[in-house]
Image: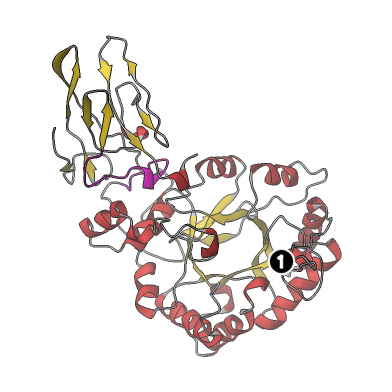
Amino acid sequence: MSRLKPAEEDEFEGVILWYVTSISLKLLKNNNYAIFFPLQISLNKKPEEWKEMSSVKLCSVKLNDGFFMPMLGFGTSAPNKVAKSEVEEAVMKAIDVGYRHFDSAYLYLNEEEIGRAIQKKIADGSVKREDIFYTSKVWGTFLRPELVQTSLEISLRKLQLSYVDLYLIHIPIPLKPGEELFPKDEHGELIFDTVDLCATWEAMEKCKDSGLAKSIGVSNFNHKQLERILDKPGLKYKPVCNQVECQPYLNQSKLLEFCKSQDIVLTAYAALGSNSGKEWLSKNNPVLLEDPVLSAIAARHRRTPAQVALRYQLQRGVVALAKSFNEERIRENFQVHGRAVGGRGLMEAPRLPLLWVIGEAPKVYLGQARLLAYAMHASAVSNYPPPPICCREGTRKWERNPEGQLWVSVLFFRPTVWP
């Protein structure tokens, strides 16, 4: 069996860490014989609309209402262990580094500190208000139409701003109005509210008309929920963006395709992997920034895994939110502009983590036959029939190609990301 071999710099129209030149299989069935076949890598080129831009101001996406949003933003949601003063310091450091797009929300309970940081940098001449693109969100307890603008006005007072650049519906889940962010009953269950999101959207449109928000959009909406807004009779403004969790382990390719078809920008939060809600995750859940593929691509191009993950989003037209409260990482994460990671373009596999090379070849038994193979994603194979053996929770499938030869390949999928 052949070994995996590093790809050369100019060998492909893109980048991949490893490829298989050939796999030698010996199957013991009636007579001993060996099957040799090559596996070729198919890589997508970077989008034509992506242009190398040295200026942060120029590296923006035009929204469907005519305003521009910087492609790289600074996320500000913070776990409880992070002091609010650290958030304020991080925002000021981010402005010094060059960030101009800041994402926050009523839910984060830190807009006062963020506003103070912005005001300090305006006061010392570092930036002007018009240089800053600020996003806030209306939380689920304010989704009744009469409460939407109230929530925005609360945020503006805390921020010491007269308007936000982008205002989003944080979640498509109305919650009981009140002081509690997560209202619960005596059994500890969330108390929901009955609100038509189309009515909520009409209230969002009024916020735009009043000048309190330049642009309006949604967050955590799926395809169907977006369609409800888009198909609303009398729709005045389309959502300019949909902010969702998006990263190489959850690349939202179908949602991205739909959003592009509707001229809606997809914004990625948790672009460097989610570190919240750990109680929902298995202790064996893979850590994005420790992924061997990302790490190796980063090493090859003298970048960090975080830079590769962020550039991956930018090159597919997704606005990325980077979050860190460490000065060095804040600076590193910003250094994703300029020459494309991967030379002519970053690999665009449908699910990057599934293109996962296993260090030790797994063993699969079929009677007396022993198969040794390396795991590869199906989309990486071109000019040959799709790999016929799929190891999905222990299942296997054998098929023959049109020439009657027995095609053998193995797909190992991480259970947490299996479709």
Farthest top residue in view: 403
Q: Is residue 242 left or right of residue 40?
A: right
Query: Which residue is drawn at the image coordinates 13% and 34% (left, top)?
Result: 2
Q: In the picture, residue 24 is in which quadrant?
A: top left
Percent coordinates x, y for residue 230 in the rendering:
72, 44
Camera-side residue: 291 or 91? 291
Task: Please tell me whether residue 27 is drawn above or below residue 223 in the rendered image.
Answer: above
Residue at 82% over, 46% down: 234
State the count of labels.
Answer: 1
Which residues lie in the magenta part? 345-362
| The stretch drawn in magenta includes residue 361 | yes
Residue farthest along the right direction in this orientation: 146
Residue marked by disc 1: 138
Q: Main secondary structure of the magenta part?
A: loop
Q: Quadrant of residue 243?
A: bottom right
Q: In the image, is residue 266 part of the stretch drawn in magenta?
A: no
Mark 1 closeness class: few <14, some 14–19, many ≥20 residues within 10 Å: many
Residue at (37, 47) in percent of width and height: 353
Say whether residue 411 is left or right of residue 10: right
Q: Is residue 42 above or below residue 84?
A: above
Three-letter code, disc 1: Val
Classify 53 as above or below 86.
above
Question: Is 403 above or below relative to 185?
Answer: above
Could you tell me which residue is drawn at 68 percent across and 46 percent down? Answer: 226
Residue 39 image point, x, y percent: 24, 29
Where does residue 321 sit, x and y in percent of width and height? 49, 63
- Residue 53 in view in this figure: no
